[in-house]
Image: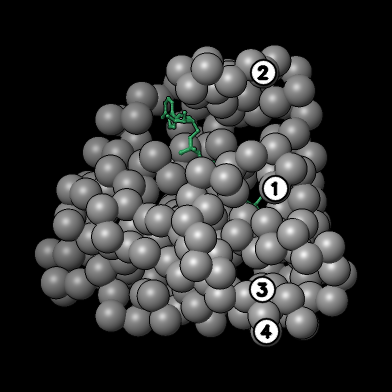
Amino acid sequence: MNKINIAIDGPAAAGKSTIAKLVAQHFNMIYVDTGAMYRAITLFYIQENSEDFDELVKKINLEIILKDGQRVNLNGEDVTERIRENDVTEKVSYVASKEPVRTFLVEEQQKLANQKNVVMDGRDVGTTVLPDAELKIYMIASVEERANRRFKDNELRGIKSDIESLKTDIERRDQYDMNREISPLVKAEDAISIDTTGLSIDEVTNKIIELANVKLTK
Ligand SMILES: Nc1ncnc2c1ncn2[C@@H]1O[C@H](COP(=O)(O)OP(=O)(O)OP(=O)(O)O)[C@@H](O)[C@H]1O
Ligand SMILES: Nc1ccn([C@@H]2O[C@H](COP(=O)(O)O)[C@@H](O)[C@H]2O)c(=O)n1
């Protein structure tokens, strides 16, 4: 098999996007961050101040540029950095629970992966977006470790934060994502769980590269 899709799902800050990017680089595959797409619709929801999600998805012009890392254009404007801000993070799980939003984005994500050769990370990639992905990973880490990682990340970016608030935000988002009605965050039956607590970025990346190599040499 010379082309495969890899699905990486898991809770907030488990390391999905960091590892997915490195695995994609290693195999010269395309990396798709589905969370960024939910974040872009959330920014549009904030701008439009409307609860009419059917209308929002009809009006949105979302462009995902997959060259040299992923960039996101919303209605012609590059919002790649803007969608990481707190107002978006606070509301994204609410917006992501809405049926018109999920139907619209799942279709877009399936189009991005239809030629294979994609590493896609999110919450429902292995269960809903790419149920036939050749390799599915369910990535977890303790909430303490995830909050510590986000804290260090923020420090490096010069953003002030505290561990307790980070823990609360991570837990709130996980609860929402795991308990929504449509495509909740859950491990796909055929996914391989990797607990990254105490593992380095290189150790996790190499583990997934090994698993992917097995699929590629079949
Ligand atoms: N195995 C690891 N060991 C140490 N730090 C890690 C590891 N994996 C990721 N990190 C760090 O943890 C932070 C969060 O990782 P990342 O953003 O990749 O998580 P995520 O699962 O994609 O989060 P989200 O779903 O919230 O976007 C980053 O600063 C990253 O460098
Ligand atoms: N496949 C996905 C991906 C993301 N979400 C929702 O978006 C939020 C933000 O995701 P990040 O990966 O950028 O943190 C996430 O908390 C989910 O609510 C989703 O539903 N499905």
Mark sitting on residue 58:
4
Secondary element type, mark 2? loop
| Residue 160 occupies quadrant | top right
Q: Residue at x 35, y 81 (%)?
A: 114
In the image, which is nearer the foreground, mark 3 or mark 1?
A: 1
Q: Residue at x 56, y 69 (%)?
A: 75
Q: Position of residue 125 (x, y in %)?
A: 51, 65
Q: Position of residue 162 (x, y in %)?
A: 70, 15
Q: Disc 1 to disc 4, how far (Cα)?
A: 20 Å
| Mark 1 touches mark 4? (CB < 8 Å) | no
- Quadrant occupied by the C terminus: bottom left
Q: Is residue 81 left or right of residue 99?
A: left
* Residue 138 visible, this angle: no
| Mark 4 touches mark 3? (CB < 8 Å) | no
Q: Position of residue 151 (x, y in %)?
A: 58, 19
Q: Earlier in the sequence, mark 4 or mark 3?
A: 4
Residue that label 1 marks: 88
Q: Earlier in the sequence, mark 4 or mark 2?
A: 4
Q: Amino acid at mark 3?
A: Arg
Q: Amino acid at mark 2?
A: Ser
Q: Disc 4 to disc 3, how far (Cα)?
A: 13 Å
- From the viewer's side, name the closer residue of 28 and 201: 28
Q: Is residue 210 left or right of residue 142?
A: left
- From the viewer's side, name the closer residue of 80 and 11: 80
Q: Amino acid at mark 4?
A: Lys
Secondary element type, mark 3? helix
Q: In the image, is the residue at mark 3 within 8 Å of ligand 2 by its beta carbon?
A: yes
Q: Is residue 42 above or below residue 21?
A: below
Q: Amino acid at mark 1?
A: Val
Residue that label 3 marks: 102
| Mark 2 touches mark 3? (CB < 8 Å) | no
